[in-house]
Image (cartoon, coloured by chain):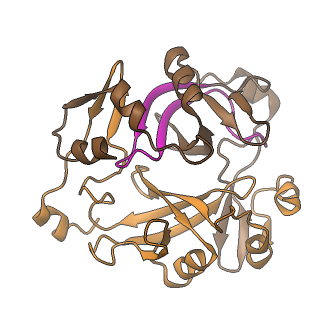
Chain colours: A orange, B brown
Amino acid sequence: MKLFKHAETLAVGDSLSWDAVLAELPFNADGLLPAIAQQSDSGEVLMLAWMNREAILETLSTGRVCYWSRSRRRLWRKGETSGHHQTLKELRIDCDGDTLLLLVDQQGPACHTRRSSCFYHAVRGEQVVVISAPQPDSESLSSQR
Amino acid sequence: MKLFKHAETLAVGDSLSWDAVLAELPFNADGLLPAIAQQSDSGEVLMLAWMNREAILETLSTGRVCYWSRSRRRLWRKGETSGHHQTLKELRIDCDGDTLLLLVDQQGPACHTRRSSCFYHAVRGEQVVVISAPQPDSESLSSQR
């Protein structure tokens, strides 16, 4: 936390060592941080998943996003079964280091329901409305956004 | 979870009762869900915070975003001391109900460092670079975006 407090005072373009920042990331009791994936060009928020130290390092070294699956309790290379990979454009860290923002280029739909984003339920008055449709298979397979 | 599984099959425009969805939200062991705040017009991801049931209900009824502060262990009406409120435009829920996306209109900077977004550290090679500057006081106070 001291490091992040110090960083508050830095000017645009100033930098810290990634190793020093990594050593100070306040992982939770399960060794995880929440990571928001945002499509880099459109700004669409795609999903939220979790990363441990290993997932962060693999993502940075390969350029392909790797999460930690809390249900399967193992590394989850996004798209490993669906083919719907995420290419990392930039990894950002918030003010106190406890949340990650991944700017990505999403291959096909991000959601397991084949919707572009996981956030397809909108609360509107007393109802929750479905606001997006699954992408057809063919469209998804040929999509190279 | 059954409700969210059912919702996967719904068409655009179909709806569920908010009361039924609220009853099925899978709050974590602390009674919380992560909530991403995104500026509704620009798409900028502003911050991630946490909401309990009460914070969600207050946010929907007042139209002003209220979180749960994990450090202070109380409701946190965003802007209550800084004046940097968030007006809710829409609350969205992800595919399995365990993350919220708040489309908001942010008054002034979202971050406690007076930066527009909390995500101002970018990992670039072996460095972490500061990519945005705090807003000056006067600019912030007169900002009515």
Q: Residue at x 21, y 66 (%)?
A: A143
Q: Quadrant of residue A72?
A: bottom left
Residue B42 appears anywhere in the view: no
Is A84 on the left or on the right of A53, as rendered?
Answer: left
Q: Which region of the structure is painted magenta?
A: B86-114
Q: Position of residue B139 (x, y in %)?
A: 74, 29
Residue at 44% x, 32% y is: B91
Residue B98 belongs to the span the image colors magenta: yes
**B53, above or below B30, in the image:** above
Looking at the image, which residue is at 41% across and 31% down?
B22
Measured as percent of width and height from the top left, residue A136 is found at 12, 58
Residue A20, quarter of the rendered image: bottom right
Q: Residue furthest top?
A: B62
Q: Nearer the viewer, residue B78 or B24?
A: B24
Apparent side of residue A21 relative to residue B20 in the rendered image (left or right): right
Residue A122 in the image: x percent, y percent?
35, 33
Could you tell me how many numbered marks the image carries? 0
Image spot of residue A32 (x, y percent) = 62, 65
Q: Nearer the viewer, residue B51 or B80?
A: B51
* Snapshot quadrant of residue A99: bottom right
Front one among B68 and B130: B68
Q: Is residue A88 in view? A: yes
Quadrant placement of the C terminus of chain B: top right
- Say if the magenta span includes residue A7: no
Residue drawn 28% across the image and 76% down it: A81
Using the image, determine if residue A79 lies above or below residue A1: below
Q: Image check: B95 left or right of B13? A: right
